[in-house]
Image (tube, rainbow, N blue to C red):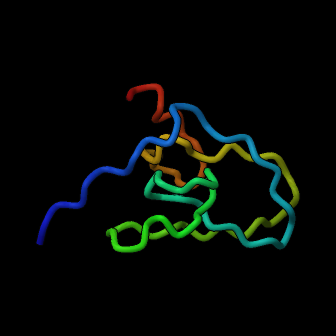
Amino acid sequence: MPDTPPPHIAQTAPYKVELEAGKTYFWCACGQSRTQPFCDGSHKGTAFTPTRLVAEESRTAFLCGCKHSAKAPFCDGSHKSL
């Protein structure tokens, strides 16, 4: 089985987004989406799949832009070591 390549680094900072309670979002895990930080289907044909996020409450969130967070889809500061 071939090794999965690392995700593309969309940006080296988190995306500040407003989440709406009860709404479902799909966070881009491959880094190729043109609608960052959300999935646009660019991962098709790769080993990547988007991460489903259902907002429990309306709030501001910081979603990972480097695609290396251990707490994906949320930023954990991993971009600081890239």
Report the residue at 80% width, 71% height from top: 23
Q: Is residue 59 above or below residue 14?
A: below
Q: Is residue 60 above or below residue 44?
A: above
Does residue 4 appear to the left or right of 39 in the view shown? left
Report the residue at 56% width, 45% height from top: 64
Q: Position of residue 20 (x, y in %)?
A: 86, 62
Q: Position of residue 82 (x, y in %)?
A: 38, 29
Report the residue at 43% width, 66% height from top: 43
Viewer-closest of 39 and 80: 39
- Image quadrant holding the N terminus, namely bottom left
Q: Position of residue 12 (x, y in %)?
A: 51, 31
Q: Quadrant of residue 51?
A: bottom right
Viewer-closest of 78 and 7: 7
- Residue lying at the far top of the rendered structure: 80
Report the residue at 46% width, 47% height from top: 67
Q: Position of residue 79 (x, y in %)?
A: 47, 32
Does residue 26 appear to the left or right of 57 in the view shown? left
Viewer-closest of 6 and 59: 6
